Structures are given as C-alpha cells and as structure tokens.
Image: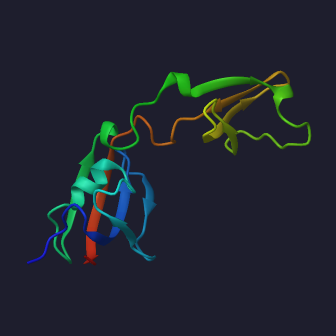
Amino acid sequence: MTTAQIGSRVRVHYTGRLDDGEVFDSSEGGTPLSFTVGGGQVIPGFENGVVGMAEGDTKTVNIPCADAYGERRNDGVLEVPRGEFPPEMPLEVGSSVQGQQSGGQTVTFAIMAVTDETVTLDANHPLAGKDLTFDLTLVSIEG
C-alpha cells in the first residue's frame, strides 16, 4: 500500500481546532488542500502528520505551537506614529496593513489599536502561541 512520504504530492481534507474546540479553518465541503510533503508549504506539524498515511486514512494530530506558527513574539508588536499613515487611509482595529522590513520583505500587520497619536500593529500570525489540533483525511497521493 502506498503511503505519503517526503516528496509525495498529496490532497488532504482537514479541520483545524484550538484547545477549546473552536474550529479556525476547514476544507470540509470544499476543495482538499494540495501540497508536496516536505516542501514547506504548510506548517511542519501538519506535514509530519500526513507522513505514513494511505489514501482514505483519517487521523487526528496535535501540534504544539513550536511546530505550527511559533510562539508569540513581543518584538512583533509595534507602535507607529499616526502620521506615518496617509490621512485618508482607514485604520480599523482587526483590519490588516502591509509594510516593509528594512531588508525589503513585505510584512502583513494586524491593527491592534488606534489613537489620535499612534497605531499599534502586530506582525505575529493570529495563531502564534497556540497549540493546534487537526483532523486529517488523506484524499489522494499524486506522486
């Protein structure tokens, strides 16, 4: 029986939950997620969970935050003067803005707070610092 290995192209249905049971993402009822195992396209714990599965297999994997989106980093939270943003730009808590790091890489920030003087931005992934649980169903192995 063929099982998913590093280098296999796979299609997987998944449901991701937090420790409290809240579903944060799911492919059920939609298109399965397609990726190459070991290609770094999904979080490491998800990739590792698929290894060894055969078509039609289902399982639940618990992924510590270190193998998911990492720990929350306090240095990812920035307070920026309000004047750094165009006056017509809508700045709403919960929305996102993009900026550039000194090396030129684009970073997406969540707006955490807005005052007349400052805008507080967070570059952490929304799931950083959280352990995740995924229910996986391997739909197919393509190679």
Q: Position of residue 34 (x, y in %)?
A: 38, 70
Quadrant including the C terminus: bottom left
Foreground residue among 120 and 105: 105
Up-down relation of residue 88 to residue 84 (above or below): below
Q: Quadrant of residue 6?
A: bottom left
Residue situated furthest right in the rendering: 88
Q: How many circles with numbers are drawn on the protein?
A: 0
In the image, 133 versus 105, the foreground residue is 105
The answer to whether 65 appears left or right of 59 in the picture is: right
Q: Nearer the viewer, residue 92 or 122?
A: 122
Image quadrant assignment for residue 117: top right
Name the residue located 22 percent from the left edge and 56 percent from the top edge.
49
- Residue found 44% across the figure and 38% down from its top: 128
Q: Residue at x 37, y 45 (%)?
A: 20
In this picture, residue 115 sits left or right of residue 8:
right
Residue 87: horizontal and vertical position, in percent?
91, 36
Q: Which quarter of the rendering shows the N terminus?
A: bottom left
Residue found at the far left of this picture: 1
Residue 19 is left or right of residue 57, and the answer is right
Task: Report the coloring of the rendering.
Answer: rainbow
Name the residue furthest front. Answer: 103
Can you give x and y, in whole percent of width and height, for residue 121 in the image? 66, 31
Q: Quadrant of residue 104?
A: top right
Which residue is depicted at the point 34% across and 57% down? 39
